[in-house]
Amino acid sequence: MSGVWVFKDGLVRRVENPGRDEEASSESSSGGGRRKVLVHVPSGEVVTSYEVLERRLRELGWERYVDDPCLLLFHQRSTVHLISVPKDFARFRLLHMYDIVVKTRNIFEVRDAA
């Protein structure tokens, strides 16, 4: 496993190819830069908008949290977990996808885009 750990805007992430453009490398996978998508496993539905994501999260007991001008926040009353994603879906990145996967075990997964 190679790469460089980068700290930016309060987040730490591993960059596979530090010589590439930062935005491109945040979208790349360890295998070769294929685009990733978030998939709701029980239905096989690809999350293509926040409406889809919010509907699926609500089914699991997640609720919208405080109104933030930059972020959409979701929480579950039964846990201390908080999911935060940028309000603009175009800024939804791999980091956000994996955050959702970790906090909703066996419900969502990240896959290569078809």
Image: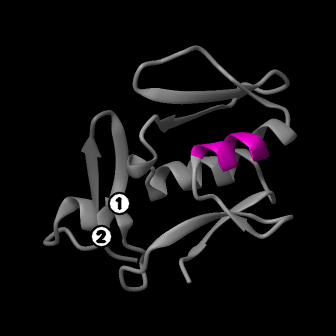
Which x, y percent locates residue 68? 48, 18
Q: Residue at 19% of width from left, 68% of height from top?
A: 18
Examine the rendered structure and indicate whether residue 44 appears above or below residue 83: below
**Disc 1 and disc 2: Cα gap in Å?**
6 Å
Magenta-colored span: 50-56
Question: Secondary structure beneath disc 2?
Answer: loop
Around disc 2, counting alpha carbons within 10 Å, would you say few (fewer than 14), some (14 to 19), or many (20 or more)? few
79 versus 108 height, above or below: above
Q: Residue at x 67, y 54 (%)?
A: 101
Residue 69 on the magenta span: no
| Residue under label 1 | 14
Corner quadrant of residue 65:
top right
User: Split into 4 quadrants, where in the image is the N terminus?
Assistant: bottom left
Quick one: label 1, few (<14), some, or many (20+) residues within 10 Å?
some
- Which numbered disc flags the more N-terminal residue, 1 or 2? 2
Q: Are discs 1 and 2 less than 8 Å apart at CB?
A: yes
The amino acid beneath tag 1 is Arg
Taking the spot 25% from the left edge, 60% from the top edge, the residue there is 23
- Residue 24, by quadrant, is bottom left
What type is the residue that disc 2 sits on?
Gly
Measured along the vertical axis of the image, is residue 31 above or below residue 8? below
Counting from the top left corner in percent of width and height, residue 29 is at: 42, 75
Q: Secondary structure at mark 1?
A: strand
Residue in the foreground of this view, choosing between 51 and 16: 51
Q: Which residue is mark 2?
A: 3
Q: Residue at x 31, y 71 (%)?
A: 16
